[in-house]
């Protein structure tokens, strides 16, 4: 009995809350995408298997999110609630003030790749074209076209040279104009 339930469950992905999906959105098996205050996901976004995306904000176009990635809030529960066990503290979805706090949102630009097992905490912006290496833990903003690695994630390189960025942007703009 349990084996049959597990087989059915592992074939699903879960979407809940205020999530707006763009065209050609793909979500892998056993991934969970939810937002209490609103999450807009762009076109041509791929989310791998076993991911947990539980934030407000925006995920841009052409984003690739590998398996086992977490994009989660750093303040999902009000840790300042005196006299309340953290398990019972007000949750972001129950509090408009918590949901509106920019520290509870994530902005991921277009053309970003988030590698296997990476964690992106709320309150950050990941710039266009950036790459987040496998296992990285992002707690600060990532500049456009930076490659970040480690815990906490730090810039260790650039995806392209400035000339290559200009060429890349021109090709992407041309492709967008052709649609």
Image: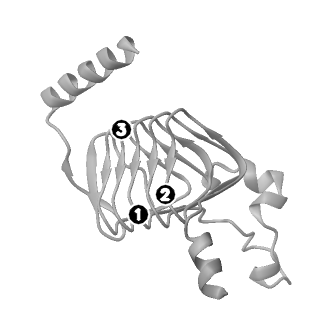
Neighbourhood count class around disc 2 (C-alpha, 10 Å): few under 14, some 14–19, many 20 upward: many
Residue name at image x 47 percent, y 37 percent = 60
Q: Label 3: which residue? A: 111
Q: Label 2: which residue? A: 28
Between marks 3 and 2 in the image, the one whose residue lies nearer the viewer: 2
Report helix, strand or loop for mark 1.
loop
Location of the C terminus by quadrant is top left
| 1 sits left or right of 164 in the view | right
Ranked by sequence position, the earlier of labels 1 and 3 is: 1
User: In this rendering, is residue 96 above or below 20?
Assistant: below
Ranked by sequence position, the earlier of labels 1 and 2 is: 2
Q: Which disc number belongs to residue 67?
A: 1
User: In this rendering, is residue 2 above or below 59?
Assistant: below
Neighbourhood count class around disc 3 (C-alpha, 10 Å): few under 14, some 14–19, many 20 upward: many
Residue name at image x 75 percent, y 69 percent = 78
Neighbourhood count class around disc 1 (C-alpha, 10 Å): few under 14, some 14–19, many 20 upward: many
Between marks 1 and 2 in the image, the one whose residue lies nearer the viewer: 2
Ranked by sequence position, the earlier of labels 3 and 2 is: 2
Alpha carbon separation for disc pair 1 and 2: 8 Å
The answer to whether marks 1 and 2 mark residues whose Cβ atoms lie closer than 8 Å is yes
Residue name at image x 27 percent, y 24 percent = 169
Report helix, strand or loop for mark 3.
loop
In the rendered view, how is the structure colored?
A: one colour
């Amino acid at each position: 009995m349990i084996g049959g339930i597990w087989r059915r469950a592992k074939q699903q992905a879960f979407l809940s809350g205020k999530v707006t999906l763009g065209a050609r959105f793909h979500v892998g098996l056993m991934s969970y995408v939810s937002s209490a205050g609103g999450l807009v996901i762009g076109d041509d976004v791929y989310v791998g298997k076993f991911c947990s995306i539980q934030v407000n904000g925006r995920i841009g176009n052409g984003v690739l999110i590998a398996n086992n990635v977490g994009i989660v809030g750093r303040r999902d529960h009000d840790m300042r609630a005196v006299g309340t066990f953290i398990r019972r503290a007000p949750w972001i979805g129950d509090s408009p003030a918590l949901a509106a706090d920019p520290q509870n949102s994530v902005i991921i630009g277009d053309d970003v790749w988030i590698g296997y097992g990476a964690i992106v905490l709320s309150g950050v912006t990941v710039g266009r074209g950036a790459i987040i290496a496998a296992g990285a833990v992002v707690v600060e903003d990532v500049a456009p076209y930076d490659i970040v690695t480690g815990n906490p994630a730090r810039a260790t390189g650039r995806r392209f040279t400035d000339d290559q960025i200009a060429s890349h942007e021109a090709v992407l703009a041309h492709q967008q104009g052709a649609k």
